[in-house]
Image: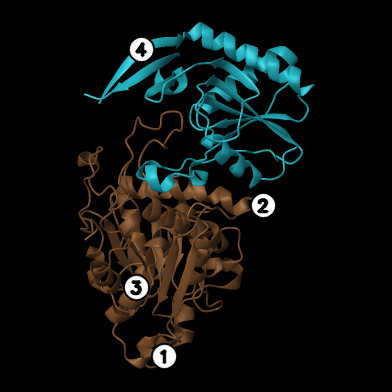
Amino acid sequence: MRIVEKAQLMSAPEIDRTLRRLAHQIVEKSGGTKHLALIGIRRRGVPLAQRIAQAMRGIDGVDVPVGTLDITLYRDDLSKVAPHAVLQSSDITFGVDQMDLVLVDDVLYTGRTIRAAMNGLFDLGRPQRVSLCVLIDRGHREMPIEAQFVGRTVQTSDTEIIEVRLREIDNEERVVLVDRQEP
Amino acid sequence: MTFRFRDLLALEPLSADELTFLLDQSRSFQGIQRNPLKKLATLRGKTVALAFFENSTRTRISFGTAAARLGADTMNLQAESSSLKKGESLLDTVHTLDAMKPDCLVMRHASSGSADFVARHLDIPVINAGDGTHEHPSQGLLDALTIRDRKGSLANLNVTILGDISHSRVARSNIHLLAKFGCRFTLCGPAMWVPRELENIGPPGASIRRVFRIEEALEDADVVLVLRVQTERLHEPALSAADYILLYQLSAERLRLAKPDAIILHPGPMNRGVEITPEVADSPQSCVLEQVTNGIAVRMALLYLLLVGGSEESGQEAHPATEAPQPLSRRATDKKENSSAPADKDPSHASR
């Protein structure tokens, strides 16, 4: 199987602009940042959440707490993908009760990750509201889940993969569409 | 890092990297002990058989709680009610348990090597919860996790072990683990419990010395592991309990000879007033209750790894096929040849 890069969907400046727009939208929709907190889903949701929080500091001058959530234990496909599920620590140092939480992830696809993330969150308490922010929505949902804040919607086929590469993790900064081609 | 073992029978064959991986995975489960909702569904539908052919309370409860918090069910076999009392062989008993289709067997037995023996006859993962005087790997891991939490690192610590070391599987598992991180060991107790052979049980080059005066053994210690003294082994004329207390009890006064930030471990259950004074057991330097809490995290990590598996890169929903799904059947015993073909059906037990 070959992995072929088909197109670049976002450049580094576009990612930056998009995250700042998402930060504005989240602040606007939340009507204040008093109970607001961002939860980055490991791995690439974590730097995205931190950058959105950074952008919010510029808007409201308010520090929005950022937590990280590892959903490995909540996956519904552990027995299938498994030997690849090394656990990372979740790190949410604030109480989630009554909070207005925004889950942040890089790509929204089937919705199963978000289903797992919500299960994880509710083991920690009872948030007042949970919404979802993603950099890319690529369709193909298998769960009744939608994102309230979307960086870009992209039409994709089943064999295509969207790779969000972030400098914190991948040492480069862009979003690309790649395709798997059977030899 | 891949966990290449199908069972956990001993810490001796594990490398420092593999041990670090197990401790890191355990740390991920520490947080769950503080959640308001502690029960996960990760192992829902799985069954863990707990076969304790030797009496145990805390280890059995700890494994049972770990299984429950992961959502697994347990089957319990206890020494008292065991058919072993009616003359059934060990192998017949575990085959009977296995026929009830558990997904994993946790076992304790008074014979060294028994877990290894059973694992060779079963296809499911086996976790050794203590075999004779050989090893107690989950205890070694939880001790190391506790030490790492308090000291920040396992590197180059002075570890003093007090008590009946010759009969102690806890001491052996601790030595096999900690020696790989450069810890130096001082073994101290009555000569009959600290035979010369113990100097050679660690990996090659391990620093293990025997000392028969507790005052000397405690000097410069970073970690003091106090072993439970089997009171039935304390008797005239060999050694009376009064003599043991006089010569080897860890008291606050003696503890002052160790480093000021030395920590105390005890695998429990403690004989307060025999091997340790209540004052020391309850001091801020004592980690006894942290050990118990960490035990559940370690055992959750072991059950998770052996029943679900684990290697780098938690799967990402957005890219479901960048890593081809692996056949779960026989774990990643050989990661390199385990790309996407349905290889790895070899039932050989890597840890043997």
Mark in the foreground, 3 or 1: 3
Which mark identifies residue B235? 1
Indicate the amino acid at tag 3: Ala
Mark in the foreground, 2 or 3: 3
- Residue A134 location (% of width, % of height): 57, 23
What coloring was used for the rendering?
by chain
At label 2, counting other C-alpha atoms closer than 10 Å, the crowd grade (few under 14, some 14-19, many 20 or more) is: few
Is B128 situated left or right of A20 in this image? left
Secondary structure, mark 3, is helix
Host chain of mark 4: A
Secondary structure, mark 4, is strand
- Residue B150 location (% of width, % of height): 51, 50
Labels 4 & 2 near each other (Cβ < 8 A): no
Which color was chain B given? brown
Q: Could you say which chain is coloured cyan in the image? A: A
Which mark identifies residue A6? 4
Is B116 situated left or right of B107 in this image? left
Location of mark 3 (residue): B99
Location of mark 2 (residue): B36
- Residue A139 location (% of width, % of height): 51, 24
Q: Are marks 4 and 2 on the same chain?
A: no
Task: Name the residue located 35 percent from the left edge and 87 percent from the top edge.
Answer: B84
Q: CA distance from mark 1 to mark 4?
A: 80 Å
**In the rendered image, which quarter contains the C terminus of chain A?**
top left
